[in-house]
């Protein structure tokens, strides 16, 4: 595979800087360059009278913005150290040092061609050159390059923001070497963690082509049938398996001028007159662009947020009058039916089965989009799987168009379309006549999909292990309502949580104990992973609150002991244990990971001991583990106190990492823990870590002795918290929680330097936790969190 160690990004705008940031996240050194800005004094030339720093100001400012942007484009601020700013005039020769050169300037063919011709003579003979274009012809750009370089030139369309949006459309040109395209696909997937689809060199490629068609089709339905902005968004959001931003919030986020540009790109380049007409920008969009009401970046678009005495209020646009009015909620029987069921497929079926005007709207949106997507197979991509993947990853649809078609019934919907005069592509009709009832077919434990009018195996790389697929192949070993133990191959088992929100309750704790027994007897090691939206949001807070309100203190004590014992069972298992968290991993979820020998975390893991936010402290071993890690960081005679201070601040302020590397910075993960960029590879990498530990002759961990800072160190922690209370930064109840936390982290009132047992610290944890559970203000915090999902600072 082509090795990429260094890269250069030309264009320091939002996309170029975002791509540079994500390359830096992946450990790649990046040269970020832009044009030389106009000189402050118009009488000076751009070359004379400007310092080197001034000439690189556009890139320098872009790197500075990366550190302030929210959500952060960087895993942690230090990643910016891998980005070197420069300018095209002074640094063009340095493009020859890069293994990959990415053009990310404005979407104009003439400017892109001019730049490519200029850099073609300086790039290294092995370097790959790509354009981050959202729809301009790769072939037309390649004409500006010498023939040898055309074989190493292709399109790499990142979606914005590059760190968070998983889709990259890979667009080979007519002369791109297939080996180069394959190497780049592997690099994008493995090193950058992207979901890659191969698109053909057509206007707007795959996702923007179908997504823009769907949005324009919906806008026309709105004008024809008189639906409001709120009605359209109520139907085209989660009820249809789409994001909450639905139609008009999505347009506001994208920017109406950007959307109009994307639509124009197809309207100008499409060969079919009907398609050019379908991509014509509606009058309402043109008027909004004329007025400068471009969406979120302009402060108003289809929605407008205003401040009132009662707080912020959302107004929605009436496109007939071009006036704003308070947004009104939309209710109907079909929408209620969709809300009542789980899963995108079931929601769509429930919505479309309705008989009201919103069910009709949903059908009108769906039928046009499905027919259009089918008509583009072979033109924008050969594989329906790539089209579905592009829409899931690029537009956050839960189901791609062909997956949705299967979910709502292929044969009956085609009959309905034909009855309503919708042109169904001939290949779909032939597919049905051949006796097929769906586009995806399960046979012998494998999935096949339509490719070139025939069934082709839907192959996933061997590194893409799926718990769902393994369970479908009868690999479940043990199971209860909250968790399952699954054989994931190579004599490794996986403990999967599947309770509501993956919250930890008695069923999961019981399965942890049973899993430890099974692995001890029959397996080389254990992975703790799942495929839920979030890894684990913590313990079952509702159950805990109910027991506390009933003053069932013996039951609360029993629950906490059960949790602590289960964590020790994991930690002291004679076989290696690797945790593989992803996305939200909070409270008890972090404590489960801390009990593992190693953590293989998805890069987008937001990780924190957040118990203080609900008036408690970590009591499943989390506080104990933070004390242990503080001692580890200070091994060799260094003072433990600074590390304990840091742990005290992290827990007391309920800090949550912005990424897996950031969790290492916070001391919540160890430097030996791994970051996995690609979510689909997470289970595979965790299994591999188990096997590595096993091959290295793993020996289980026994009882550890932990040196603590004792009563003197506790006084230091309490002084810091007292200062914050006196300064008005924390409340009296925060002060009470902080003192309990300080007592546990410091190891109680023992002399400084005393080595205590894990059980001793666990007893301190449990005692502090129980006493805080009895506090009315803690119970109020718990209740508020359950009701609103937000912390209460009382």
Image (cartoon, rainbow, N blue to C red):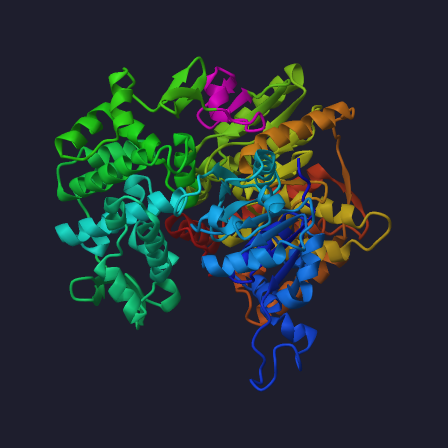
Q: Residue furthest top?
A: 444
Q: Is residue 97 left or right of residue 64?
A: right
Rendering coords of residue 7 (x, y %)? 65, 51
Q: Foreground residue, 64 or 634?
A: 64
Question: In the displayed structure, would residue 319 be above or below residue 411?
Answer: below
Residue drawn at the location 37% of the way across and 41% of the way down: 397
Q: Foreground residue, 619 or 215?
A: 215
Q: Foreground residue, 33 or 549?
A: 33
Rendering coords of residue 440 (x, y %)? 37, 23
Residue drawn at the location 56% of the way across and 55% of the way down: 103
Instruction: Tell me which corner region of the image, top left, top right, bottom left or bottom right, holds residue 53.
Output: bottom right
Instruction: Tell me which corner region of the image, top left, top right, bottom left or bottom right, holds residue 549.
Output: top left
Q: Which segment is the magenta one?
A: 459-486
Rendering coords of residue 484 (x, y %)? 50, 24
Residue 61: in magenta span: no
Rendering coords of residue 305 (x, y %)? 32, 66
């Amino acid at each position: 595979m082509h090795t990429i160690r260094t890269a250069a990004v030309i264009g320091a705008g939002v996309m170029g800087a975002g791509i540079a940031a994500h390359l830096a996240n992946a450990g790649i050194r990046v040269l970020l360059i832009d044009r030389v800005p106009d000189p402050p004094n118009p009488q000076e030339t751009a070359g004379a009278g400007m310092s080197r720093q001034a000439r690189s100001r556009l890139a320098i400012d872009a790197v500075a913005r990366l550190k302030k942007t929210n959500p952060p484009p960087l895993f942690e601020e230090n990643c910016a150290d891998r980005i070197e700013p420069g300018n095209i005039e002074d640094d063009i020769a340095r493009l020859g040092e890069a293994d990959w050169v990415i053009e990310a300037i404005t979407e104009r063919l003439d400017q892109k061609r001019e730049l490519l011709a200029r850099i073609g003579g300086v790039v290294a003979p092995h370097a790959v050159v790509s354009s981050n274009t959202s729809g301009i012809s790769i072939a037309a750009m390649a004409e500006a390059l010498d023939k040898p370089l055309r074989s190493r030139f292709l399109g790499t369309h990142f979606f914005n923001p590059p760190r968070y949006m998983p889709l990259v459309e890979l667009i080979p040109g007519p002369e791109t070497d297939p080996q180069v395209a394959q190497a780049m696909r592997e690099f994008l997937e493995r090193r950058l963690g992207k979901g890659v689809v191969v698109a053909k060199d057509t206007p707007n490629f795959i996702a923007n082509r179908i997504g823009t068609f769907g949005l324009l089709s919906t806008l026309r339905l709105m004008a024809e049938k008189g639906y409001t902005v709120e009605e359209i968004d109520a139907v085209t959001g989660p009820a249809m398996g789409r994001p909450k931003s639905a139609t008009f919030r999505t347009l506001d986020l994208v920017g109406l001028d950007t959307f109009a540009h994307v639509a124009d790109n197809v309207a100008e380049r499409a060969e079919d007159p009907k398609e050019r007409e379908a991509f014509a920008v509606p009058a309402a969009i043109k008027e909004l662009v004329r007025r400068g009401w471009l969406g979120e970046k302009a402060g108003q678009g289809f929605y407008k947020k205003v401040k009132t005495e009662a707080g912020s209020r959302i107004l929605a646009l009436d496109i007939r009058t071009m006036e704003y009015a308070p947004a009104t909620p939309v209710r109907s029987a079909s929408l209620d039916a969709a809300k009542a069921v789980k899963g995108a497929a079931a929601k769509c079926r429930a919505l479309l089965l309705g008989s009201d005007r919103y069910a009709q709207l949903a059908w009108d949106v769906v039928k046009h989009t499905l027919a259009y997507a089918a008509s583009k197979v072979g033109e924008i991509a050969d594989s329906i799987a790539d089209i579905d993947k592009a829409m899931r990853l690029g537009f956050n649809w839960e189901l791609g168009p062909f997956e949705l078609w299967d979910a709502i019934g292929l044969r009956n919907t085609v009959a309905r379309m034909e009855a309503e005069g919708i042109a169904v592509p001939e290949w779909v009709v032939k597919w049905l006549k051949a006796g097929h009832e769906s586009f995806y077919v399960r046979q012998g434990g494998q999935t096949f999909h339509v490719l070139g009018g025939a069934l082709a195996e839907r192959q996933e790389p061997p590194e893409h292990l799926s718990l769902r697929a393994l369970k479908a192949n009868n690999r479940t070993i043990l199971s209860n309502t909250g968790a399952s133990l699954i054989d994931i191959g190579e004599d490794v088992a996986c403990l999967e949580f599947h309770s509501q929100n993956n919250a930890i309750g008695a069923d999961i704790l019981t399965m942890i104990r049973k899993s430890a027994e099974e692995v001890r007897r029959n397996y080389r090691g254990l992975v703790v992973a799942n495929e839920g939206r979030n890894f684990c949001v913590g313990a079952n807070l509702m159950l805990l609150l109910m027991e506390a309100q009933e003053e069932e203190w013996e039951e609360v004590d029993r629950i906490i002991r059960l949790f602590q014992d289960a964590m020790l069972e994991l930690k002291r298992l004679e076989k290696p244990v690797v945790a593989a968290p992803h996305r939200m991993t909070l409270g008890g979820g972090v404590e489960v990971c801390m009990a593992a020998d190693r953590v293989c975390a998805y890069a987008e893991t937001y990780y924190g001991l957040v118990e203080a936010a609900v008036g408690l402290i970590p009591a499943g071993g989390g506080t104990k583990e933070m004390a242990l890690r503080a001692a580890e960081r200070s091994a060799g005679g260094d003072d433990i106190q600074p590390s304990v201070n840091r742990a005290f601040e992290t827990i007391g302020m309920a800090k949550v990492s912005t990424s897996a590397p950031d969790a290492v910075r916070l001391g919540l993960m160890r430097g030996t823990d791994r970051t996995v960029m690609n979510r689909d590879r997470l289970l595979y990498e965790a299994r591999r870590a188990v096997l590595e530990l096993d091959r290295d002759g793993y020996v289980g961990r026994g009882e550890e002795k932990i040196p603590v800072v004792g009563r003197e160190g506790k006084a230091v922690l309490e002084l810091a918290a007292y200062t914050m209370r006196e300064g008005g930064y924390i409340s009296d109840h925060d002060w009470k929680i902080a003192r309990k936390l300080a007592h546990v982290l410091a190891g109680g009132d023992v002399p400084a330097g005393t080595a205590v047992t894990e059980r001793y610290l666990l007893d301190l944890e449990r005692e502090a936790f129980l006493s805080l559970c009895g506090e009315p203000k803690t119970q109020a915090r718990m209740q508020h969190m359950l009701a609103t999902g937000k912390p209460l600072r009382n």
